[in-house]
Image (tube, rainbow, N blue to C red):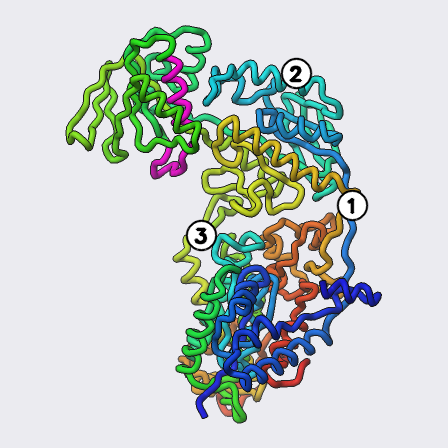
Amino acid sequence: MFRECVLEADLNKYLFNFVNIRDQCTWVHMKQPKEAFEKAKDLLKMGIAKATNLEPLQTVKISVNPTALVVGGGVAGMSAALSLSKQGFKTYLIEKENKLGGRLNNLYKLFPYNLDASQVLNNKISEIQNAKNLTIYTSTIIKKVDGFIGNFEVEIEQDGKFINIIVGTIIIAVGSSLLNPHTLFAYDGKVRITQQELEIKLKNNDLNANNIVMIQCVGSRIEERQYCSSVCCMTALKNALIIKEMNPNANITILFRDLYTPGTIYEKYYRNAREKGILFVRYNVNRIPEVKEDQIIVFNENIGDDIILPYDLLVLSIPLIANSDNKELAQKLKVPLEINKFFLEAHVKLRPIDFATDGVYIAGSGKWPVDITESITQGYAAASRVSTILAHKGLEVEGATSCLPEWNKGLCKGCEVCINVCPYHAIKKNELDEIEIIQALCKGCGVCGATCSKKAITMNHFTNEQIMSEILALGGKEAI
Amino acid sequence: MSFEPKILGFLCNWCSYAGADLAGVSRIQYPPNIRVIRVMCSGRIDPEFIFQGFMTGIDGIIVMGCHPGDCHYIDGNYEAEKKFRMVEKFLSFINFDKRIRLEWVSASEGARFAEVVSSFTKQIKDQGPSPAGGVNPDEEISEKLNAMNMAATSYRMRALVGRERALTEQENVYGERIPKEKFDALFDQAIHDEYIRHRILVSLARDPKSVKDLAIEIRAEPSEILEHITILKGRSQVNFDKIVGNTPIYVNMMEI
């Protein structure tokens, strides 16, 4: 607001300094007017000292290429790409497998309305095939990413063929993988299988078992993998209900630690499962169920004793885990991963679809396990975030950024600590082996300046001289 | 008249400065001793600012940033903490470590901001006036602060503190990671060594001296002083001046 006033006077807007006397002096020292007056004088002195050292700065204008890239052709990526192409933005959708669909390819029915997964998938694919502005590359991976918001230069590889594209934004919708179930609960792929293998059996109508036991949280919510995979409770309920419908006499027992069916509809789904006669037995993580050849022994805390359950099919609910190539992709895109190697958003509440790096967004279970509904929601969310960028011809980038002034280049020893500490990967070494700060990526935190081992980097608008002048004005000595 | 300390606060723009504004809007009262300098991120606080602040006679300095994990700039506050811990270790040599504090205050914590400022103001009042301030500042303390500032600004200390997180939290290209304890031991030794070395440099800048005189002044073993002199000679920071009797005299080669 004040900066705009300065602009109206035809002055550089960075030639403005604010002294906060109301909020941080008058209002907080209302009963000590004399001391508050002294404080206000000091604050003014400091503010004036800094103001005399202010320098005009230029904002940088960057152009925006109105093109989007979506990485991952699962349901989240397809939803995002469709939304963007419908809005008229040229969109590339790349998928590393040889066909679109991701996890939808292997699902039978979708909770909570038991829609056919294949039908949902076919609808999406036919929409995509008819979409304008949408280019699809299957069996394609990202090789290299350069540039920044508005103009990312991306090299992709399709079957050994390299293609270069320029896009304004990138959506990561790479999804997740399944944990390898071998070594868990005597998994054998025949009578002891995963929920996903059960779905294939159901799809092929190839299930002949009467006593079915399902174990939840297999390999998740444990020391080694602490998160909840979020989709397995509903998946188990769904498959149990499908079996019950096909064979009402089937005995189905679900061994669980905690059941996660949030919201009105999912909770109803769970109640329905109970009414249909599906049994739920809680087990304790410290005494996990013991799998024998044809029976399971599970300790139940309520009765204080073991329960013996005979089975002819044991189904393990294994978690979704981060893709093994997430790290490689994250490095190329300069975005962070969290401890389980899922992609980490900029802020869990305030910016759930953004990355800290501008122009890159996340949707679907690449961030953490989500079901199909949530994947679609996030796909649309990411598309709408992208459209806020692509709808503009250009962007203005903050002028108060770090810089390595020409006259300080001789100081730089090339130690690279600045590259290390920069949260935005805005600092790199160029072809001349010189440190280069990319203003479009810099957010102006100033960590590099405070860290630079030779004090060569200057943080514009918060230079050492400006801050030191404030300190000296307070300390009562002459400003340098 | 009771002692009214001069307190300097470095507040990050996004969390603690906004928290201070909220305290204002909510009319929460706190002692009027604090003077605030706004920075974009607590990670911007160069260790130099704190030493220089004390050299100008400020009695206490508080740094406030966003809560861990909430930093507007992803992890600038973690970098701030590393630098702060280094400054704290240096200042403990002159019992100034109780004159600084690092606090995390969010934009919604106006009341907490006021509490933190009140408690820090009391802490500084208990510490009494800074010996480096007032009309007649203690020259020895000022000289020690100067030595610390130079030590913290040295390439070695800045490179170490700048790499701390990379070295202890990530693996290097060989898949190795330095254990935290090992790094801390190395870091503490570096702080100690660089402090003594810069005390030597500051003292020699006043006038050339022998190892024995330096040892008396700095209150360290002559053997340790000699070791440091050897290293400083290697860095071309001190040089042999002349021999008086049987004693070599050294001189500072740098501009201070």
Q: Quick one: label 2, few (<14), some, or many (20+) residues within 10 Å?
A: few
For the point 72% across and 25% down, the residue is: A134
SS of the residue under disc 2: helix
Q: CA distance from mark 2 to mark 1?
A: 34 Å
> Magenta segment: does it hold A230?
yes
Image quarter of the C terminus of chain B: bottom right
Give the labeled residue for mark 2.
A126
Q: Is residue A326 above or below residue A51?
A: above
> From this viewpoint, which residue is outermost toward the right?
A10
Say whether residue A403 is left or right of residue B172: right
Q: Looking at the image, is mark 2 or mark 1 earlier in the sequence?
A: 2
How many numbered dots are placed on residues in this image? 3
Q: Is residue A443 visible?
A: yes
**Residue B64, percent from left and from top:** 51, 66
Give the labeled residue for mark 3.
B178
**Residue A45, percent from left and from top:** 65, 81
**Residue A460, percent from left and from top:** 70, 64
For the point 43% across and 33% down, the residue is: A263
Q: Chain of mark 3?
A: B
Give the labeled residue for mark 1.
A394
Q: CA distance from mark 2 to mark 3?
A: 54 Å
Q: Amino acid at mark 2?
A: Ser
Q: Chain of mark 1?
A: A
* Labelled disc at residue B42: none
